[in-house]
Image (cartoon, coloured by chain):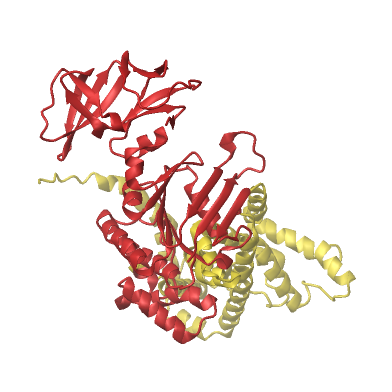
Chain colours: A yellow, B red
Amino acid sequence: MNKTLNQKAWLFVIPVFVLVAFNAAIPLMTVVNYSFQETFGSNVFAWEGTRWFKEILHSERFHASLGRQVIFTFIILLIQLPLGIGIALSMPKKGWGVPVCLILMSMPLLIPWNVVGAMWNIFALPEIGFLGNSLNSIGFDYNFTQQSGDAWFTTILMDVWHWTSLVVLLSYAGLNSIQPAYYQAAEIDGASRWDIFRYIELPKMKKVLTLAILLRFMDSFMIYTEPFVLTGGGPGNATNFLSLDLVKMALGQFDLGPAAAMSLIYFLIVLLICWIFYTIMMKDEGRT
Amino acid sequence: MAKITLKNLSHSYLSQQTKDEDWALRNVNIDWKDGGAYALLGPSGCGKTTLLNIISGLLRPTKGEVLFNDRDMTALNPVERDIAQIFQFPVIYDTMTVYDNLAFPLKNRGLSETEIDTKVKEIGEMLELTSTLNNKASGLTADGKQKISLGRGLVRSDVNVIMFDEPLTVIDPHLKWVLRSKLKELHQKINRTMIYVTHDQIEALTFADEVVVMHEGQIVQTGTPVELFEKPKHTFVGHFIGSPGMNILPCAFENGQINFGGKILPNRVNTKKNNFKTTQIGIRPEFINFSKEGIEVKIKRVSDTGRHKVVDAECSGGKIKILANSSTKIPSGSAHITFDQNYTYAYGDNWIIE
């Protein structure tokens, strides 16, 4: 067989290259460039080598915000996954309840981040907000602008409200793809409700749950807009998560070099955790 | 092990039924002997899976009773009925090993470790799964997985009946033969009542001692493979069984005689009673012979299948198929045929007249 040589296909790939270059490669390389240099404005740069990376890795400020970030992500995953799976399991499988539930579930996902932040800010205000006022009137000393525990509580509650639906919808899709024969066979085998969940539903949901965990991990680890509008990182530094801290450093203090180094470290942490998690979860998939 | 009796079973998936079509099953009566091999045969949507699920207890019938050994089981769930069912797609527990899959129904019934071990090893041996017992079940091929589903049914010694719902659908053709003979062999070995649902006539006829043919929610005929072939009681059975199916052609009953396209056929049955909407004769292509005189036909097409020839012909009564030995010389153009009287039947409103 004689294949004719035709290089025209490259033309079709060029737009993608250009697009990726402008929205990913070039900005990333600019950040890499900053991370090795010091600038005092007016476009004057001086080479600093790996100084910023060393500083960030040894900085207590970075450790603190990374710690807060890890705890926050861990808590919301711990709440959202079981809660999401639970809601998906109790949603109706047919009838008019299905569209009603699906619409109710998608609503929080459709609201822009800053609106969610603003909504919860007003909702939780101790004097006039419905949540804040109610909590205070039943005897809790609740004030998310003053007390760090309350600020954490409110931020986590907001994230759970905003994003649990994503886990619900993914789990529901996974559950719906299970053939009825599995449930019938389990019934005949005498399996308990827990067995059905443990040996049928959970294994069949593995792929969608992997996706849900990855998405929720990445989004929550990089959360910015909602806490920025709700607490602004406060009170003090109580809810000062990684991306909030990064923006303060880059735009507040205009420390471009350290901020660039920090964002690269940040990026590598996210990438590394995702890769490790995905590799572990997909270890057995190749054989089937 | 049990004898199974179905009494006046009807089932509808609707809450209200006004016409015949609202019923998925209509007035089904069956008596199955203990230890027999039975097949439910019919096209998709004829109600055979519904009937199976009613026997297994996954569905409650709208009307009627299910009896095992004359004991009413209608209100019991599948576990209480002690049945096993194998589904169209292999159902396995992905995260368990083959061994744990086979042991699962026994564990749920509270058997001791040693009892479970003996039973699982015995069944593993029988199904030739011994070498893979410790592998993860999800890594097996489709037929291996279906063997596990089968094994989970066989592993319990107390099952009343083992039911198969088109179990070979996802199996490669060359393995179908292997698994089917395995099933037959198992039936002889363990001697339990087995019910096999399929739309494939060859599977049904080779597996079962008695085949129940279903059509639109009703049983149209029950019989041995030979009976179904030689004497279809309903035109549907004639069509559905055999390849090509029976020739069903319109005719008229006149003064107790059958008038087929202007020709009076010799008549063995009483066709005096004549208040049918449709009247037809049925003759299998196998029982038509070429002859010097008889019904005149025009030969349209001859297809040679190797073992025999299928002749498409046309006569004044309609289109007709004839099956001839591959050595037979087929006349071209026009010819005469005769029907074997012993296998020519008259049908009134699709049911045989006897």
Residue occupying image coordinates x 49% and y 73%: B105
Compared with residue B16, is residue A18 higher up or lower down, i.e. above or below?
below
Q: Position of residue A47 (x, y in %)?
A: 41, 76
Q: Nearer the viewer, residue A124 or B334?
A: B334
Q: Is residue A214 visible?
A: no
Instruction: Locate residue A7 relative to residue A235 in the image: left or right.
Output: left
Instruction: Locate residue A67 relative to residue B194 in the image: left or right.
Output: right
Q: Is residue A79 visible?
A: yes
Q: Position of residue B70 (x, y in %)?
A: 57, 60
**The C terminus of chain A lies in which quarter of the figure?**
bottom left
Compared with residue A110, is residue A61 higher up or lower down, i.e. above or below?
below
Residue occupying image coordinates x 89% and y 70%: A137
Q: How many marks?
A: 0
Q: Nearer the viewer, residue A10 or A138?
A: A138
| Quarter-of-image position of residue B268 | top left
Residue occupying image coordinates x 33% and y 51%: B203
Compared with residue B193, is residue B157 higher up or lower down, i.e. above or below?
below
Compared with residue B293, is residue B160 higher up or lower down, i.e. above or below?
below
Instruction: Locate residue A107 relative to residue A132 in the image: left or right.
Output: left
Residue occupying image coordinates x 63% and y 43%: B14
Q: Position of residue A255 (x, y in %)?
A: 54, 73
Residue furthest toward the top?
A: B262
Q: Position of residue B42 (x, y in %)?
A: 42, 43
Q: Nearer the viewer, residue B34 or B257?
A: B257
Instruction: Locate residue B347 relative to residue A167 in the image: left or right.
Output: left
| Quarter-of-image position of residue B54 | bottom right
